[in-house]
Image: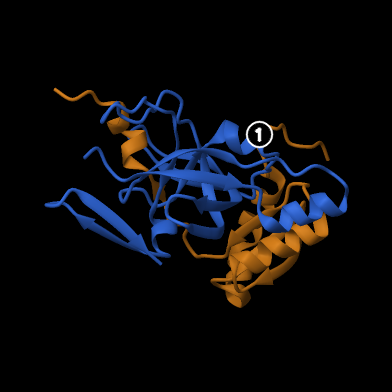
Chain colours: A blue, B orange
């Protein structure tokens, strides 16, 4: 078992979608791909070019600790949905990160896919993650 | 005042927030500040409320939503920043 991978959709927040619609501007379609649950991460991270493609502006800048000292990261407001879990998380803050080159593993005959998000504890705080290591599965309830 | 470059978003709002943080802590500790340029638009008890008000007022223009805390908690994504995701299995 590589880890807790699940498909993810990153949408323009509903508030902004409504504003765009009222202004007769098109609402960008959601960015879709694979996410990895990362219990070591304080914040959920999304590949930043995908957030820019949604037409989003940063709403905050935070400091993130790295091996080379603190770096600034842009924070965006998004709506997240996990279609395979049937869980629409709603509005949440995510950081923009560079996930270039991060791929899901080639296992069970599946083609590797780009990883577009790391699901951190600010999102996991809204659910209960159950890791059944001996049986090789995990589940989420909310 | 010149607009900040795109690579440094919200610089004006962040500088204003920093200059006012101690003052706001006296009255609004823990709340979320909605800031545009050099103006505190309003404070809110939740992020959702602050973001909604920002979009309602400014649409897709940049604005800052930041919680008023004495010390900002440092965030970390160890798997990303120590390169664990790139690590090759032996």
Residue occupying image coordinates x 80% and y 49%: A20
Q: Quadrant of the N terminus of chain B?
A: top right
Image position, residue B13 (x, y; %): 70, 50
Image position, residue A76 (x, y; %): 60, 47
| Whether residue A36 can be seen here | yes
Up-down relation of residue A31 to residue A91 (above or below): above
In the rendered image, which quarter is residue B81 located in? top left
**Residue A92 appears left or right of B87:** right
**Residue A51 appears left or right of A17:** left
Up-down relation of residue A21 to residue B27 (above or below): above
| Whether residue B23 can be seen here | no
Outermost residue to the bottom? B27
> According to the image, label 1 marks what residue?
A53
Residue in front for this viewpoint, B35 or A33? A33
Residue occupying image coordinates x 61% and y 55%: B18
Residue in front for this viewpoint, A140 or B20? A140
Up-down relation of residue A54 to residue A137 (above or below): above
Image position, residue B32 (x, y; %): 61, 66
Residue in front for this viewpoint, A84 or B14? A84
Chain letter of disc 1? A
Q: Quadrant of the C terminus of chain B?
A: top left
Residue occupying image coordinates x 68% and y 42%: A56
Which SS class for mark 1? helix
Image position, residue A61 (x, y; %): 57, 46
């Amino acid at each position: 078992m590589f880890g807790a991978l699940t498909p993810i959709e990153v949408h323009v927040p509903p508030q902004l979608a409504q504003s765009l619609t009222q202004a007769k501007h098109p609402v960008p379609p959601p960015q879709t791909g694979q996410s990895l649950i990362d219990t070591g991460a304080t914040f959920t991270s999304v590949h930043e070019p995908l957030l820019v493609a949604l037409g989003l502006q940063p709403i905050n800048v935070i400091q993130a600790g790295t091996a080379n000292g603190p770096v600034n990261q842009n924070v965006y407001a998004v709506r997240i949905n996990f279609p395979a879990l049937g869980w629409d998380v709603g509005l949440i803050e995510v950081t923009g990160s560079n996930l270039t080159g991060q791929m899901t593993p080639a296992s069970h005959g599946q083609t590797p896919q780009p990883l577009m998000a790391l699901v951190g504890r600010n999102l996991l705080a809204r659910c209960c993650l159950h890791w059944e290591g001996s049986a090789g599965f995990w589940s989420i309830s909310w | 005042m010149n607009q900040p470059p795109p690579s440094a978003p919200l610089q004006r709002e962040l500088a204003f927030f920093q200059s006012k943080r101690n003052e706001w802590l006296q009255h609004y500790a823990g709340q979320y500040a909605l800031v545009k340029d050099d103006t505190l638009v309003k404070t809110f008890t939740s992020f959702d409320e602050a973001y909604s008000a920002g979009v309602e007022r400014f649409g897709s223009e940049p604005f800052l939503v930041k919680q008023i805390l004495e010390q900002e908690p440092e965030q970390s994504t160890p798997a990303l920043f120590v390169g664990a995701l790139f690590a090759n299995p032996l």
